[in-house]
């Protein structure tokens, strides 16, 4: 699944870039920042998980007020949960709290439409196509000889609608933030699982 996800993400992003680069006003750059995600099973909300993201961004102006943007990002989302666990040491059972760290490593392709209220400030709405590279559940304790298990039942492609905003510091640097909503479940099966996450960072435009 890993190589299929990477190929699908690359094809999606390169197709968008190819379609947009015909115009000389096309802007290309890089961005990186902080991600904070919240995961829930049904209505059971897990502890938040923080990570980073980094990748490439391209924007094609449609008019003085409208732009279409596509990105290719590497990141990780998920959540953390403490559950009771019986640990047996020297035939002496002890009840401890075991932390489960749900880790979805993704290649994300956010596609958005931006509206410029002023030349330096814009708001955006779009859809984040998130291709899962790996799905793991990690623990501090060794269980069955390992501290990492595959997290089964997760869809290969997750969809996150989002709203965001961007401010251009100058012709090269910008800061942005967006929230990816948990409207669509990320898994198959009878336990609906959803994730919402905030992304905030800084970017640099090459041209």
Image: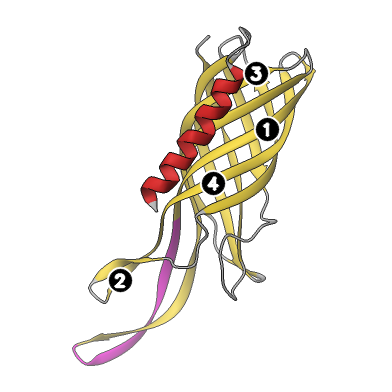
The residue beneath circle 3 is: 60
The residue beneath circle 4 is: 130
Name the N-terminal-most of marks 3 and 2. Answer: 3
x 61%, y 7%: residue: 24
Asked if the stretch drawn in magenta spans residue 102, the answer is: yes
User: Residues at badges 2 and 1 in contact (C-beta under 8 Å)?
Assistant: no
The residue beneath circle 1 is: 112
x 66%, y 43%: residue: 179
* Residue 48 percent coordinates (x, y): 54, 56
Report how far apart the C-alphas of labels 3 and 2 lie in the structure.
Answer: 49 Å
The residue beneath circle 2 is: 141
Instruction: State the SS at label 2.
Output: strand
| Magenta span of residues | 90-103
Name the N-terminal-most of marks 4 and 1. Answer: 1
x 48%, y 34%: residue: 11
Q: Residue furthest left?
A: 90
Report how far apart the C-alphas of labels 2 and 1 lie in the structure.
Answer: 42 Å
Q: Quadrant of residue 151?
A: bottom left
Report how far apart the C-alphas of labels 4 and 2 lie in the structure.
Answer: 30 Å
- Nearest the viewer among 192 and 141 is 192
Q: Nearer the viewer, mark 2 or mark 1?
A: 1
x 46%, y 35%: residue: 10
């Amino acid at each position: 699944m890993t190589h299929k996800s990477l190929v699908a993400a690359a094809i999606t992003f390169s197709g968008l870039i190819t379609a947009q680069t015909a115009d000389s006003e096309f802007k290309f750059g890089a961005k990186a920042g902080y991600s904070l995600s919240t995961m829930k099973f049904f209505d059971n909300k897990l502890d938040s998980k923080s990570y980073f993201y980094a990748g490439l961004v391209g924007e094609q102006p449609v008019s003085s007020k409208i732009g279409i943007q596509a990105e290719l990002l590497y990141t990780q989302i998920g959540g953390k949960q403490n559950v009771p666990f019986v640990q047996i040491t020297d035939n002496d059972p002890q009840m401890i709290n075991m932390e489960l760290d749900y880790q979805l490593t993704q290649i994300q392709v956010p596609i958005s439409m931006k509206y410029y209220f002023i030349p330096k400030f814009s708001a955006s709405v779009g859809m984040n196509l998130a291709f899962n590279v790996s799905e793991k559940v990690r623990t501090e304790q060794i269980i069955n000889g390992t501290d990492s298990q595959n997290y089964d039942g997760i869809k290969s492609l997750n969809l996150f609608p989002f709203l965001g905003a961007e401010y251009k510091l100058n012709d090269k640097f910008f800061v942005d933030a967006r929230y990816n909503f948990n409207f669509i479940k990320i898994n198959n099966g009878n336990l609906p699982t959803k994730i919402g996450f905030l992304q905030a960072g800084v970017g640099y435009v090459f041209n």
